[in-house]
Structure formats: structure tokens, C-alpha cells
């Protein structure tokens, strides 16, 4: 009897842990909103510090008067209807862009002159210009943020680009 109970508890824990790895829209409200106190792991396979730190490429816009918009996450790759439990090929593209952004930070820390002329910077600027641009925007700026987990609202700015005209 104890053996069956233990098997059921471990099986249920494994199923809930796997379900927690799905995008928030696929999770029941209980998994999203209830604090699990570390009982259900977060398997962030492409994070540099597994389930501890995440990075986010964000973009904002300037209008003709110089007013700044709020930061928006960049859409790196179009997501289809994939099953995220086993393999999500889109995440490889996302990781490639994040690696490029990390290279920009590395160049800045090494005090490399003219970081803006580097290939990684140009790649991120191009990605920023490919985002959905709001009406009235005249300039674009991208930033690279660090945050503790997917639910965190506290993001630390690691890199801030200069403002660039949208049409160029």
C-alpha cells in the first residue's frame, strides 16, 4: 500500500513538473498562480544558469517629440503549434540572438571602440527594425535585460543601444 501511494505521488509530481515547462497558456491557473516553493522544478534548458537567470532583448521607440515608448520584448522567431515538452526548434533561434547580444555586452566590457560597427550590434539593430513599429515612431533603441525568472518584473538593464533612425 505504501509502495502504491509513493508511486502515485512521484508519478503525479513528474507529470505536474513536465506540465509546468509548457508555455503559460497551456498551464492550468493553479500551476501558474500558486507558489510551488520549489517543489516543481523549472527546466530552463537554454538558460546560461539553469532556471536561475534569463535574458531578454527588448525594443522601444522615440516619437518626433522625443517621447519614449515602454519597452517591448522582441519577437525573435515565429512560433507555431509545437509540443514544448520535448523539443522546440524555435528556441535555438532565440538562443542564437541572445548569444549575439551577450557578445555585444562582452565587446562593451572589453572597451572595444565602435561597438556599433560590430556584426553582433548590427544583427540586433536589424532585428529591432524588423519588429512591429508603432505609428509616429521616428527612432528605435534596443536593450538587453537580465531577470531572475519568467515571472519576475524586476529586470536589470545590461546593455542599451544608441537611438537609431527607423528608416535606414
Image (cartoon, rainbow, N blue to C red):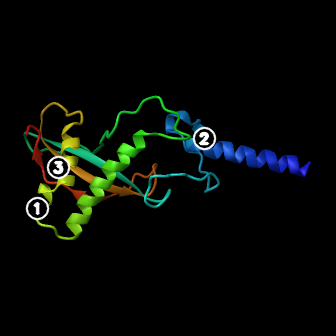
Q: Residue at x 70, y 47 (%)?
A: 13
Q: Compared with residue 107, is residue 129 higher up or lower down, i.e. above or below?
A: above
* Mark 1 and mark 2: Cα distance apart in space: 45 Å
* Mark 3 and mark 1: Cα distance apart in space: 12 Å
Q: Residue at x 25, y 62 (%)?
A: 105
Label located before the other in sequence (2 or 3): 2
Question: Does residue 25 appear left or right of residue 113 in this picture?
Answer: right
**Quick one: label 3, few (<14), some, or many (20+) residues within 10 Å?**
some
Find numbered disc 3 in the image and state the secondary structure of the residue it sits on. Answer: helix
Question: Does residue 128 appear left or right of residue 45 in this picture?
Answer: left
From the image, which quarter does the C terminus lie in?
top left
Find numbered disc 2 in the image and state the secondary structure of the residue it sits on. Answer: helix
In percent of width and height, residue 73 lies at 32, 43
In the rendered image, which quarter is residue 32 located in? top right
Q: To which residue does mark 3 refer?
A: 122
Find numbered disc 1 in the image and state the secondary structure of the residue it sits on. Answer: loop
Q: To which residue does mark 1 refer?
A: 114
Q: To which residue does mark 2 refer?
A: 19
Q: Compared with residue 28, is residue 46 higher up or lower down, i.e. above or below?
A: below
Amino acid at each position: 500500500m505504501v509502495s502504491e501511494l509513493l508511486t502515485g505521488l512521484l508519478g503525479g509530481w513528474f507529470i505536474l513538473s513536465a506540465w509546468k515547462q509548457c508555455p503559460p497558456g497551456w498551464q492550468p491557473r493553479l500551476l501558474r498562480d500558486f507558489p510551488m516553493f520549489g517543489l516543481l522544478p523549472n527546466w530552463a534548458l537554454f538558460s546560461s544558469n539553469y532556471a536561475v537567470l534569463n535574458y531578454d532583448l527588448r525594443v522601444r521607440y522615440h516619437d518626433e517629440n522625443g517621447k519614449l515608448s515602454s519597452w517591448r520584448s522582441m519577437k525573435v522567431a515565429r512560433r507555431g503549434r509545437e509540443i514544448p515538452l520535448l523539443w522546440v526548434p524555435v528556441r535555438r533561434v532565440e538562443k542564437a540572438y541572445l548569444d549575439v547580444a551577450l557578445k555585444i555586452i562582452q565587446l562593451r566590457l572589453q572597451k572595444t571602440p565602435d561597438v556599433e560597427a560590430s556584426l553582433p550590434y548590427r544583427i540586433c539593430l536589424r532585428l529591432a527594425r524588423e519588429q512591429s513599429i508603432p505609428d509616429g515612431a521616428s527612432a528605435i533603441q534596443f536593450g538587453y535585460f537580465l531577470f531572475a525568472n519568467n515571472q519576475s518584473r524586476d529586470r536589470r538593464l545590461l546593455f542599451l543601444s544608441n537611438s537609431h533612425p527607423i528608416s535606414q
